[in-house]
Image: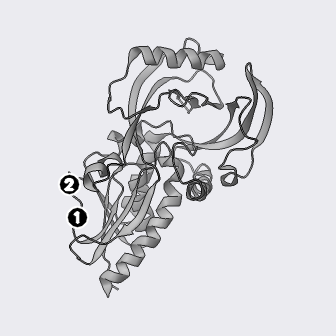
Amino acid sequence: MVPVRVVVVGAGVVGLTCAVRLAEAGHEAHVLARDLPHETTSAVAAALWYPYRALPQDRVTAWSARTYEVLTELARQPGTGVQVRDGVELLGPEAPDQPWWRAAVPDLTTVPDPAPGYPHGWRLALPVAEMDVYLDHLVARLEQAGGTLTRHWLAELPASGVVVNASGLASRALAGDGTLSPVRGQVVKVAQTGVKEWLIESSDEERPLYVVPREHDVVVGGTADAGSWNLSPDPETATAILARATALVPALRGAEVLAHRVGLRPARPAVRLEAVPHPDGESGGVVHCYGHGGAGVTLSWGCADDVLVAVEELLESVRR
């Protein structure tokens, strides 16, 4: 059987994961992207597994469960940049007994009075991906499986053959999708001060608080500014983020600030994962996979499985 080239547009965590899944399944996967992996929003992510700003709930839960399995396995392998860490989400009095995505994780315990002012919380172990290392791990796997990664700006999606569109916010133009919009996230990276557990507090939708420890630093966020394209860190916002975090995690007090980063989450009313024909009737088609909100890492492997199925159906049409 003659291999058919599959072009993957986008080199963030979703595009790379889809390409790895395709290449390791025996397909020719070639990634084209304006921004290389370390220049993407994925490189800014705190990358704690957590289904955030992504719908619909049933599909997101299934995709998240699959990704949890894969990341947990990767955490057992050296050099992947993935670790599993315990932590707590702080909850107010109106919070439900369990999260809507409960079925995606094997264990979750309700804890009383986890912090002053919070009557209960959820404690569980979650994967954390250190993105500098993890993105390199994905690229290495792609190349080892025979795939390629090339910097290349596309004014439009290829009009023939099999294409996977994982271009994130660029799909506003490439797919003509006006429902896609940015949700700006600002984070502060500080030196590791002995913080071992992650922490989330999300009572304020526009100012979610998260503290995500990694081996050498701690990512502290954040913001959720819907509709903002501003990539410049705001000093006052950074000060407020650190003040809130330090109040709940005193070990952060006095930590050296290493970097200020901003990323734009690709938000949409629902994740778009579907195959469509080329507009001019050429063989093949486009598998769209974008709109993951703040959950690109969390949904990546589950979505990649579904992309593989959709691609193989399109490949059959090309070979006929």
- Kindly identify the amino acid type of the residue bearing the numbered disc 2: Leu
Q: Pick whichever, 300 or 276, lies toward us.
A: 276
Q: Residue at x 36, y 55 (%)?
A: 166
Which residue in the protein does label 2 denote?
154
Q: Pick whichever, 32 or 245, lies toward us.
A: 245
Say how the picture is coloured.
one colour
Would you identify the image quadrant in which residue 184 lies?
Answer: top left
- Residue reaching furthest to the bottom: 320
Say what secondary structure mark 1 lies in.
loop
- Residue reaching furthest to the right: 112
- Compute the Cα span from label 1 to label 2: 8 Å
- Residue reaching furthest to the left: 155
Which residue in the protein does label 1 denote?
158
The x and y percentages for residue 16 are: 40, 55
Q: Residue at x 49, y 66 (%)?
A: 306
- Up-down relation of residue 163 to residue 61 (above or below): below
Which numbered dot is residue 293?
none
Answer left or right for 262 relative to 118. left
- Up-down relation of residue 161 to residue 107 (above or below): below
Q: Residue at x 32, y 29 (%)?
A: 230
Q: How many marks?
A: 2
Are discs 1 and 2 less than 8 Å apart at CB? yes
Residue 150 seen in the current view: no
Q: Pick whichever, 106 or 286, lies toward us.
A: 286
Say what secondary structure mark 2 lies in.
loop
